[in-house]
Amino acid sequence: MLGWLYHAILRRMECRYSYDATYLHEMVDAAPVAARRFLKMQMAGKWQGGLPREAFHAAAIGGALHEDCGPCVQITTDMALEAGVAPAVITALLSGRGDPATKLAFDYVRALLAGDPNLEDLREAAKTQFGEKGLIALSLTAMTARNFPVLKRAMGHAIECRRVKIGNAQIAVAETLRAA
């Protein structure tokens, strides 16, 4: 019933971010109720919970990077740039560096998704830095950031690692940060 609307929204996203959402169009055609539920679930990851803009977007990039270092990292990077995150901040994160608070958000999300042994220390540091609401926002961002790459792989549309474009520059993702 609302398939035409979902397709229109997806086409607008594809144009805005130069992103291939074929797998999402396929889901809308095959299971519109599932598509609606998926998109509704993704809205939880948009809640910033008072996080600084850079930390929120670092978490989204870190979550996408845990699962994929191709188009999903590119779109989260593009969204961060669109939201006003400086290119240097993103470049630093993708190179394994960054200011302490932003890198903490990035590292916490990656540790959370990986079940890293340092998770408890990072959780406490994130809670101290960002508060309980911030920790929840980071966690929701982590959960939803992995959904698109997982769905793409499940539907046979995954693409291998590639450089991330920031403006006119192509940034190589640090080898230690690439998706497993």
Image: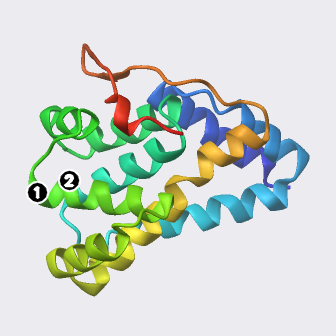
Does the residue at mark 1 contact the one at mark 2 (Cβ under 8 Å)? yes
Residue 112 horizontal side relative to residue 43, left or right: left
Residue 66 horizontal side relative to residue 60, left or right: right
At mark 2, the secondary structure is: helix
Question: Which residue in the rendered view is the most extreme toward the front?
Answer: 117
Under mark 1, the amino acid is Pro
Q: What residue is shown at x 24% (from left), y 73% (from top)? A: 126
Question: Which residue in the rendered view is the most extreme toward the left?
Answer: 99
At mark 1, the secondary structure is: helix
Image quarter in which the N terminus is found: bottom right
In the displayed structure, 140 sits above or below 18; it is below
Q: Position of residue 90 (x, y in %)?
A: 23, 38
In the displayed structure, 107 sits above or below 160; it is below
In the displayed structure, 62 sits above or below 120; it is above
Q: What is the CA distance from the residue labelled 1 to the residue labelled 2?
A: 5 Å
Residue 171 is marked as: none
Q: Position of residue 169 (x, y in %)?
A: 24, 15
Q: What residue is shown at x 66% (from left), y 47% (from top)? A: 150
In terms of image quadrants, where is residue 137? bottom left
Under mark 2, the amino acid is Lys
Residue 103 is marked as: 2
Closer-to-camera residue (49/110): 110
Question: Which residue in the rendered view is the most extreme toward the right?
Answer: 30
- Regarding residue 56, the answer to whether it shows in the image is no
Q: Which residue is mark 1?
A: 100
